[in-house]
Image: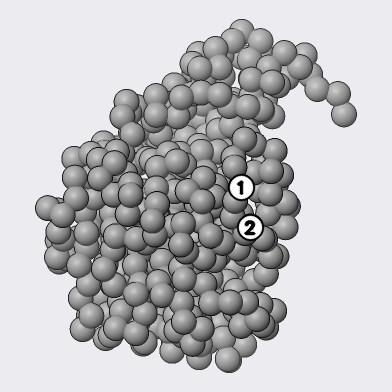
């Protein structure tokens, strides 16, 4: 297939995406600089003597964590993921770079919870640290009962499996990534991650566990911003929900955030960012800045057909169609939160990080009920989306499901 004339002239720039991510998301300074400097020696000392298992290591955050651990000369980094192609590219990228690889680096195409993973884990020497970066993270995944139950398995039941398996093999610490959507969740993705947080807290006396509530990671694979790049590469309109703002960090910051949490957190703690260090950014503003980087003016329309029908003539005129979609899909907050009023939060310990302190009695009262309910539905071999929603509504008081009957798969 031949590229059109426009793509021939711009394919190199678009392929490498050599823009300043901080500038695109409206920020000048990197986060966590003070923590990175203050704890540099401690981090280096911990990592050099440590073996790591990274689950979900082929995703954007996982790849960033793996590369950072190798740069810090981790003793061993083994990476597990179900995405064979991304694992292959991870190795190619590292081996083709100027990174000095002194780490025992291996990848495995395995699904957590499977017999193959169980045998793999028990056949290797105990891992000191296990990072769980796997997740079904899209709100759109709750539209049908089958993908939704897969989300429950990945985000909750696999984590329970790991918390039971790790102590048997002598693993010292377990980190599992969470999200800002876990705070007063309005969608099942956020609710599943909230239950995961509570599950970890319920295990805090038997295994050193920690989590980090992520905001959006700019241009991570599968994200809306990543989708902007794909649309530009394919000469297609960009679709942006109106009036929606989000907090963003970069991929490099995401790796450091995971590592800081895993090393510095006490068991059961959840790390997040201080709100005064971030500001919410309009998704429309990000789309405009990205187009300006590529030399295009935005052409706004609220008509999806117009955006698609005019795309070629607009691109020739150095303009790009932005379809402004209504913010009315299921599970979308206008603005995410990083902690709730009912949580005890330590804002004093770190310059740029806040620490959500564990409430074990609350965790013990919530997570077993939902986990048992999910297992019962699976054992029955038949369930509905409504039954899963009702399960969370019954046992997770902070869950306030926002269901408009419209899903992102119905939009550009």
- Which residue occupies 65% across, 48% down? 90
Where 188 falls versus 12 (above or below)? below
Which mark lies nearer to you, 1 or 2?
Answer: 1
Specify whether 3 is left or right of 220: right
Residue 369 in the image: state x and y as whole percent.
36, 87
**Badge 1 vs badge 2, beta-carbon distance below 8 Å:** yes
Q: Quadrant of the N terminus?
A: top right
Q: Quadrant of residue 390?
A: bottom left
Residues packed near mark 2 inside 10 Å, few (<14), some (14 to 19) or many (20 plus): some
Q: Check disc 1 and report the residue beneath it.
A: 101
Residue 221 % position (x, y): 57, 45
What residue is rendered at 69% in x and 21% in y?
Answer: 12
**Residue marked by disc 2:** 105
Residue at position x 49%, y 87% in the image: 168
**Quadrant in the rendering for residue 118:** bottom right
Give percent across and percent down for residue 16: 63, 27
Name the residue furthest top: 317
Please state, as top left, top right, bottom left or bottom right, where the C terminus lies in the image: top right
Q: How is the image coloured?
A: one colour
Q: Does dot 1 land on a helix, a strand or a loop?
A: loop
Residue occupying image coordinates x 39% and y 48%: 256
Q: Nearer the viewer, residue 400 or 283?
A: 283
Residue 234 location (% of width, % of height): 69, 29
Asked if residue 19 is positioned above or below residue 126 in the image, the reply reads above
């Amino acid at each position: 297939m031949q590229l059109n004339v426009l793509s021939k002239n711009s394919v190199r720039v678009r392929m490498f995406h050599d823009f300043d991510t901080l500038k695109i998301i409206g920020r000048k300074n990197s986060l966590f600089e003070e923590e990175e400097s203050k704890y540099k020696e401690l981090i280096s000392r911990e990592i050099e003597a440590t073996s790591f298992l990274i689950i979900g290591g082929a995703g954007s955050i996982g790849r960033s964590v793996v590369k950072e651990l190798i740069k810090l000369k981790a003793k061993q980094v083994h990476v597990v993921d179900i995405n064979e192609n991304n694992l292959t590219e991870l190795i190619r990228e590292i081996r083709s770079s100027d990174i000095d690889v002194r780490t025992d680096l291996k990848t495995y195409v395995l699904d957590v919870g499977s017999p193959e993973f169980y045998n793999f884990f028990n056949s290797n020497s105990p891992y000191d640290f296990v990072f769980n970066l796997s997740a079904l993270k899209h709100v759109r995944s709750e539209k049908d009962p089958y993908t939704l139950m897969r989300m429950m398995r990945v985000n909750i039941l696999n984590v329970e499996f790991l918390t039971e398996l790790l102590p048997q093999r002598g693993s010292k610490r377990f980190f599992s990534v969470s999200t800002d959507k876990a705070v007063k969740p309005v969608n099942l993705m956020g609710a599943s991650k909230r239950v995961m947080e509570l599950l970890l807290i319920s295990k805090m006396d038997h295994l050193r566990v920690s989590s980090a509530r992520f905001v959006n990671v700019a241009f991570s694979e599968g994200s809306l911003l990543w989708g902007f790049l794909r649309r530009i590469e394919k000469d297609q309109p960009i679709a942006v929900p109106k009036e929606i703002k989000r907090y963003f960090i970069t991929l490099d910051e995401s790796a450091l955030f995971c590592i800081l949490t895993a090393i510095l957190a006490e068991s059961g703690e959840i790390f997040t960012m201080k709100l005064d260090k971030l500001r919410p950014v309009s998704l429309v503003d990000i789309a405009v800045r990205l187009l300006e980087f590529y030399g295009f003016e935005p052409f706004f329309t609220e008509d999806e057909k117009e955006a698609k029908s005019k795309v070629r003539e607009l691109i020739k005129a150095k303009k790009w169609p932005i379809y402004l979609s209504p913010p009315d899909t299921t599970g979308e907050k206008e603005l995410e939160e990083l902690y709730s009023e009912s949580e005890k939060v330590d804002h004093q310990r770190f310059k740029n990080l806040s620490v959500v302190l564990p409430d074990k009695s609350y965790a013990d009262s919530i997570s077993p009920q939902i986990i048992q309910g999910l297992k019962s539905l699976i054992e029955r071999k038949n369930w509905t989306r409504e039954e899963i929603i009702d399960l969370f509504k019954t046992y997770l008081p902070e869950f306030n499901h926002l269901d408009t009957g419209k899903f992102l798969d119905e939009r550009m």
